[in-house]
Amino acid sequence: MAVAAEAGRLKAQGVDIADFSAGEPHFDTPQHIKDAAIAAINANFTRYTPVQGTLDLRKAIVARHAADFGSCYQPEQASASTGGKQVLFNAFQVLVDHDDEVILPAPYWVSFNDIIRYCGGRPVVIQTNEADGFSLTAEMVEQALTPRTRVILLNSPSNPSGAVMKSADMQAILALAARRNLIVISDECYAYLDFTGQRFSLGGAASATERDHLLVVGSLSKTYAMTGWRLGYGMGPQWVINAMNKLQSQSTSNPTSVVQKAGIAALTGSQDCLTPMVADYIRLRDRIVAGLRAIPGIECNLPGGAFYVFPNISAYLREGVAKSPAELAGRLLREANVAVVPGEAFGSQRHIRISYPTSMANIEKGLERMTKFFAPLK
């Protein structure tokens, strides 16, 4: 957000910025979803609802997930919040006490680390291997466990790397958590943006016993181009959901009433809008990866999902160029008018994050500027 704000300041001054900072779809919210919100306003559906969202919304959440992933949650096992971020915040507040440890694979989404620390927890960071596609295994997790471990956090597809975990690895980690009486929080906000063809949710693969150790977090933001609407959900053990609802009742109360109606339309209406979105993301991903790989010194994995690339720019981290990804990102913004997010935000000292939901013309412009910027530095 800081990078996006600086890019916005320069744009306001008339500077032409190739902006790859904000992580949100470039599509408009589908019309039938907008129509549902307008209808809700006209019908005066503008009062308080149950803290965890209306029963109709929670029915829609569990039904959509069951249809797409084979899960079997009940509406009372679901809680809706103002975005997936609030679901995560609520979950860590009720699950993690002071000095409890949370297994956090890196690179990680920027808010994970701070949310864990805010509730007094200690992030135990597992550095994944870029050469292995940033993959995480149960063996890596087991080696990091201590008597203080309380939660294992998974995020697949990943922000910022776009890495997609193997379903077998996710299931093995959940089985390990069940044996050790731990909780797995599976952040699946990008589950529908999985380009590998597996479209997997741990919630649909878990046994009844394992579901007692699993909280699935989802969001409508990325799936339906609803980032500003702010609607996310969690599904998990009844005691966890009850505690999250109790906390939410003392903070924000219910998600916005008209947004809940829009969410029901998104979840129960036609899903045809997803196919062209995914196809365009893949087209944009392939172009930006090819363009980055053509720049000498830059290495870039082909991400399996989400809508980010996480190129390794360590070849340019040297005296006279930049001492850190943050310094390099600053130079890119000031000298090449290209906005990216430095890797430090995600636990990396070797990468930058590029969000590619944008026009192909903007990608071409950004690649051209980055090529010209890096050429004399190599």
Image (spheres, grey):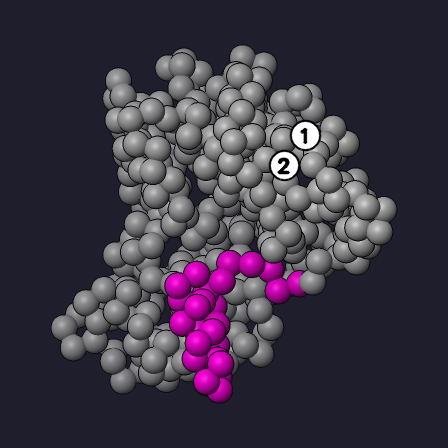
Instruction: Give residue 87's position: percent from left, percent from top.
Output: 52, 36
Residue 331: say if magenta: no
Residue at disc 2, secondary structure: loop
| Residue receiving disc 1 | 50
Tell whether 264 sits left or right of 354: right
Classed neighbour count for the residue bearing mark 2: other residues with Cα under 10 Å, few (<14), some (14–19), many (≥20): many
Amino acid carrying mark 1 in the image: Pro
Vertical order, 372 against 130 (above or below): below
Residue at disc 1, secondary structure: loop
Q: Are marks 1 and 2 in contact (CB under 8 Å)?
A: yes
Residue for point 63% across, 36% down: 254
Tell whether 164 sits left or right of 114: right
Residue for point 71% across, 58% down: 29
Q: Which residues are magenta?
A: 1-27
Classed neighbour count for the residue bearing mark 1: other residues with Cα under 10 Å, few (<14), some (14–19), many (≥20): some
Residue for point 46% across, 85% down: 13
Vertical order, 300 against 237 (above or below): below
Tell whether 59 sits left or right of 182: right
**Residue furthest bottom in the image:** 14
Using the image, tell me which numbered label, if any, was put on residue 247. none
Quarter in which the N terminus is drawn: bottom left
Looking at this view, is 184 or 179 the one in front? 184
Looking at this view, is 357 or 163 the one in front? 357
| Residue receiving disc 2 | 254
Corner quadrant of residue 350 = bottom left
Amino acid carrying mark 2 in the image: Asn
Q: Is residue 370 visible?
A: no
N-terminal of the pair, mark 1 or mark 2, is 1
Residue 21: say if magenta: yes
